[in-house]
Amino acid sequence: MNRNVSRIFAALFGILAIALPLFAGDYPLQVARNIMLYMALAITWDMLLRSGQISFGIAGLFGVGAYAAILGVIRAGMPAWFSIIFAAIFSGVVAFAIGFLILRLRAMYFSIVTLALGEIFRIIIHNLHDFTGGPEGVVMQQGVIFGGSAGKLYWLTLAGLAVAIAASYWFEKSKIHFALTAIRNNEISAKSSGVNIFRWLLLAFVVTSAIQGLLGGIFVQSYGFATPDTVFSADFTLLPLAMALLGGVYSTRGPIFGAILLGLVSEWLKLKIPYGHLVVYGIIIIIVILFMPQGLKQLVRQPANKTDRRSA
Amino acid sequence: MSKLKTENLTRRFLGLVAVNNVSFSMEEGEILGIIGPNGAGKTTFINLISGIIMPSEGLIEYKGQDITYIPAHERARMGIARTYQLIHPLENLTLIENVMVGSIFAKGNGLKEARRRAEALCQELGLTGLDRDTSRLTILEIKKMEIARALANEPEVLFLDEVMAGLNADETKDIIAMVQKIAQERHLAVGVVEHVMGVIRELTHRVIVLEAGELIAEGKYEDVSKNPRVIEAYLGGGAA
């Protein structure tokens, strides 16, 4: 696609996204909010993936942020807006601490540990009954932010998405892009070019985790309650992952496309075949991964003209 | 003072002693050949000096400073660069971006400055089509890119691990001339691992010979190649 054309499309889409609450009803706004939330998570997952590290811990850091926000309000009397920022900081600090331990791990070992971490957070919150409300969760007595106004909650989520997109572009356009790509390609040769691998991995892990925490804070402020099973739901890991894979990884655009498509399709299927929609959803993912390993991005971009090294 | 020296450098892998008690030094402007039969420990020796692996015993000194246990990325910043026997182009970056990496991280340049320097470097080495994907480069271009990537660190010491492997005679000549020019203009100390003895003879001022991890001879190629121990190491091992 021509660069200018795609820019115009992006601008139009951005205006539409901002203006949506002016004409759309509560139901489409609710759907759009969900899609934007998963889209933002998909982008953060992809950002870390650019270093070659596959995280299954999205729900973990998301849930930690969600609880940080709601407990910040209930136990510490934070204002609603500040609790969201606190959620980001808290998840970032948690990621910084555990990053020191787990960023020495690679490939499958890193993935499994991030998966286990999410579960550990959930169990801790489950069991700190007096502070966290245990399995029944906690409810914000003073009600949700903005009095639950659908339009304002939509804009709040949109702002969360904007943070994720901005961070993703920052990763793409700065030296972080070079660091993460070099690390993903070959750590040994990255070291020989002066790349401090651990430092860049830690940066990527902390930034993406902080944004996941921020989104958790936004989520919990939108619904006014948190239970371990809702905020640590595997959906928050699996759906973003599927969206990014569907749209195409290592880019900002891929997860955005993937989230729009998968989000809309799953919503539509939910109406058409209640309870059956997840089956269709799963089949779509399998087909795409089998036949379009680079995701839908492949359709937009020119197919790579790979030639044999010796032939040129 | 030597640019780089090792004292009693040793690295053991379980029972195997890959590098055994090697002491050597390199001077500014010198091109040093590192030769020996397969499995002699040449690549392990370079890995130790560049910090990819750490020694079991011994000392590495760079410009008088003890760097024995300094991590690889910091050595790259201090001015020790290398290429790899198994080429590792960064496949998701273009040719020019590959070269920029060293400038960004080893020299701390911003992206614009790094691009400018990488372009100058590529021009110097005769690389064109800088925005190509690395999958579209010829083997010669890849080898040049690997050298450019190492030079992007703006090193004082450079190790080339079999850069000529896989090149034909003309291409080899091309690279030899290039390495000589680079070394002279930048006052580099260059360490060259190579199997083709013609290359070693033409390119190097001095050679060291490793066999089973030990340094068994050192001197000018003409003298070393007559050394009975060296001849035995090559022929006796069945390598010839």
Image (cartoon, coloured by chain):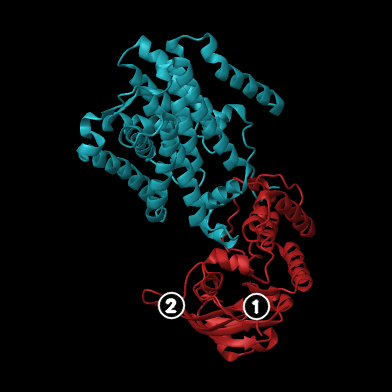
Chain colours: A cyan, B red
Asked whether the viewer can see residue A74, the reply is yes
Above or below B208: residue B120: above
**Label 1 and label 2 in one chain:** yes
Residue at 65% of width from left, 83% of height from top?
Answer: B2
Residue at 24% of width from left, 40% of height from top?
Answer: A123
What amino acid is at disc 2?
Ser
Marks 1/2: CA–CA distance? 24 Å
Asked whether the viewer can see residue A290, the reply is no
At mark 1, the secondary structure is: strand
Above or below A288: residue B125: below
- Residue closest to the eye, B196 or B27: B27
Left or right placement of residue B159 versus residue A142 in this view: right
Task: Residue A41 in the image: state x and y as whole percent.
Answer: 45, 33
Tell me the number on the disc at residue B56: 2
Location of mark 1 (residue): B33
What amino acid is at disc 1?
Gly
Which chain is mark 1 on?
Answer: B
At mark 2, the secondary structure is: loop
Task: Residue A23 in the image: state x and y as whole percent.
Answer: 53, 8
Where residue B186 sits, quadrant-wise, is bottom right
Residue at 36% of width from left, 74% of height from top?
Answer: B14
Left or right placement of residue B11 versus residue B94 in this view: left
Q: Residue furthest front?
A: A77
Left or right placement of residue B54 versus residue B83 in this view: left
Where residue B25 sits, quadrant-wise, is bottom right
Where residue B73 sits, quadrant-wise, is bottom right
- Residue closest to the eye, B216 or A109: A109
Q: Along the polypeptide, which appears first: circle 1 or circle 2?
A: 1
Please say if the residues under marks 1 and 2 sit with CB atoms less than 8 Å apart. Answer: no
Q: Residues within 10 Å of mark 2 (few under 14, many from 20)?
A: some
